[in-house]
Image (cartoon, helix red, strand yellow):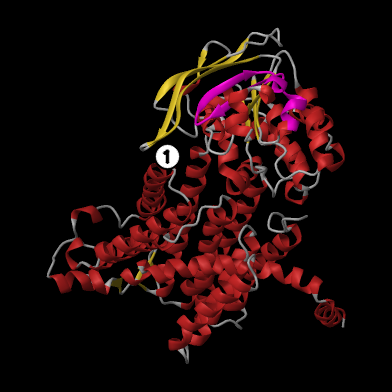
Amino acid sequence: MSDARVHHPGLFRATAGAIAVIAVALPILGGVMGGISPYFANIIGQIATFALLAVALDLIWGYAGILSLGHGLFFAMGGYLIAMHLLKAGFEFSGITPDFMIFMGWSEFPGFWAGLEHFPYALALIVLLPGALALVYGFVSFRSRVSGVYFAIITQALTYIAMLLMFRNDTGFGGNNGMTGFAEVLGQPIGAPSVVIGLATVSVLLLLAGFLFAGWLTGTSFGRLLIAIRDDEARLRFLGYETLWPKLAIWSLSAVLAALAGALYVPQVGIINPRLLSPDLSIEIAVWVALGGRGALSGAVIGAVIISALKFWLSGFAPDLWPFILAGVVLVVVVVLPNGLLDLRGLLRQHPALGNILSEKRNG
Amino acid sequence: MDKVETAAGDQALQVDGLRVAFGDFVAIPNLSFLVNFGEVHGVIGPNGAGKTTLLDAITGKTRPAEGRILLDRHTDLLALDEPKRALAGVGRKFQKPSVFEALSVRENLELALRLRPRSILGELRSWSDPRRKARADEVLEEIGLAARADTPAGALAHGQKQWLEIGMLLMQRPKLLMLDEPVAGMTATETAHTAELIRRLRSPERAILVIEHDMDFVEEIADRVTVLHGGDPIFEGRMADARADARVREVYLGR
C-alpha cells in the first residue's frame, strides 16, 4: 500500500491487546497480589486519559484532516464538570466547604452548580455540554468553509479565551487557584489505594473502549468518507456530498471523547485549574498524534504514552528541560518522520543494515 | 458567429448573459452559449480568457454577478449549491488530478456513485448494494483500469489518475461532463488514449465540455469549439474553421 497511514491491522490488534492486558493486570497486581503501587497505577491511569485524548484528536486530524489546537478546551470542560461534581457532592453529603468558596467568602454555590452533586446529571453534562459547544462552533466554522490552519488558530483562540475566563475569580469556577481538595468519588474516599487503582482501571478500560470504537468507526464506510474529506474535500463536494454533516459528526464525537478523558483525568490528578486551558497543552496533544503518526489510531496511543511517560519521568529531576525536549520532538517529526514513528518502517527498509540488527535481536 | 449543426441532440447546457467579476476585475463580461447532448464541445482561449472561471461558475465554485445557467432546459443551476449541482448531473474533472489517494481505485469509483442522493447516511448504508459494484466494474472496463482496481489511487501514474477521475464522474452518469485540461502534463501515448476515451464517451444522453490548450487535441475530439478572449466568445464553430478565422488567429494563434 502506498499510503501506509490507512490500515495497520496488526499494529492495531497489538495495541488493543496491550491495553486490555493492562486493564486486567492493574486491579490484580495493584490490589490482590501487590506489585503495582497506587502511585504507579495513578500515573498509568493519567496516561490512559491522555491516550484517549490523543485518539479523539486523531479521529478528526488523522482521518478527517481537521487540525484542532484546542482539544484542551474539551478535555478541560470534562475536567471542570467532574471537579464541580466532586466538590458539590462533598459539600452536600459530607459538609466540606470548597476552598474557593471560603476564599471568595461565599456561603452557597452559584446557581448553575445546582444538581451537580448527582453523578448521572454531571455525567450527562460532561457529554452534552462539550458536544453542544463543538456542534455550534463546528457548524459555524464548517458552514463558512473555515478550514486548515485558520480553523486550527481559531480553536486555539477559543481555548485561550476560555483560559482567561477561568482565571477570573468571580465566575464561580474557582478562578486562578482552580478547584482541588476532592474528598470522595461516588461515596468512596478518593485517596484510598483501592479507589486510586479503580480510577486507573476505569481509565484504561475507557481507553480500550474508545480505541476499539474509533477503530471500528474508521473501518466503516463513514471512515472511508472521512479519509476522502481529508484527501480532497472539494472533489467530494463536486461529487455531490455535503461534507458539512460528516465533519460536524466526527468533530462533535471527538470533543465528547476528549471531555470524557478530562473527566477521568481530574479526579486522578486531584486538581483542575486554568493551566489545563493553556495553549501549550493543546499543542502538546497535537505533538502526541504527530509523533505517533496521524491517521493510525495505534500511533496516537503510542505517541501519547511515550511523550507523557517521558514528561512524568523528567518532571522528577529536570522539569525545566521539558519545553526543549518537546520542541526537539517536533523538529524530529517534521524533518525526519513526517508520518510519525510509522515512518520508521520505511527508514528500516532504506537502511537494511539497521533492519537486520533489529530483526536479529527479535529472533535471538 | 458561424453556426454549425453537428449534433442532433437537444440542448444540455444553456448559459445566458453570464457575468463574473472579482472585485473590479471582470473575468467574463457577458457570455452566452449552448452545449447540446451528444456532442463534445471544446472551449479554448489564451490564459486568462475565462475558461476555468466559466467552469467555476457552472459548478458553483464561483458565484456569478449576473446571468442564468440552465441544465437540460429546466434545472436552474445557480439556485443550487455545489453538491446539489453535482447531483443534478454536472460532473467536473479538475485540472489537477483530484482523486482520493489513500483509497483504492475501486473505492474511489464506489464513493463517486450516489445511489441515495438525498442522504449521506443512506448512502453509507447502501455501500454493500451490488449495483454499486456492478457499475464500478463497468466503469473500470470503460477507463481501462480494471487490472488496477485494488491499487491505492495515490500509486497510479499521472495519466491513470486523470482517467480514474473521469471514471468517477461517469459513475454518476452525468448529463454534463466537464473536463478541465484533461491532457495537461500527459505523454503522447496518454494523450492519444485520453482522446480515444473521450470519443468513446460521446453519447446521446450526455454533453461533454472540454477546456484545453492543446489545439490539436481539441480538433481531434471536439464537434464544436467556442473561442474565448477576455471572457468574450469570439468564435463558435468547427475547430478547422477556428484556425482559419482572422480574429482567432490575431488573439490566440499570434497570426
Quadrant including the N terminus of chain B: top right
Q: Position of residue A93 (x, y in %)?
A: 28, 63
In the picture of the structure, the residue carrying the numbered disc 1 is A143
Q: Quadrant of residue B131?
A: top right
Residue situated in front as seen by the camera: B179 or A308 = B179
Q: Is residue A292 above or below residue B16?
A: below
User: What is the magenta range?
Assistant: B216-241
Chain to which mark 1 belongs = A
The image shows a total of numbered marks equal to: 1
Quadrant of res B180: top right
Residue B220 vertical placement versus A358 (above, below): above
Q: Nearer the viewer, residue B40 or A260?
A: B40
Percent x, y of residue A351: 80, 76
Which of the pair B235/B159 is nearer the observer? B235
x and y, in percent, of residue A315 in the image: 46, 86
| Magenta run includes residue B217 | yes
Residue A267 in sight here:
no
The verdict on residue A283 being magenta is no
Q: Is residue A31 above or below residue A321?
A: above
The residue positioned 70% from the left and 64% from the top of the image is A17
* Left or right placement of residue B72 versus residue A279 in this view: right
Give the residue at x 63% y 64%: A293
Q: Secondary structure at mark 1?
A: helix
Q: Residue furthest bottom?
A: A317
Q: Nearer the viewer, residue B237 or B146?
A: B237
Q: Amino acid at mark 1?
A: Arg
Residue A229 visible somewhere in the drawing: yes
Q: Residue at x 78, y 30 (%)?
A: B195
Asked if residue B110 lies left or right of residue B76, the reply is right
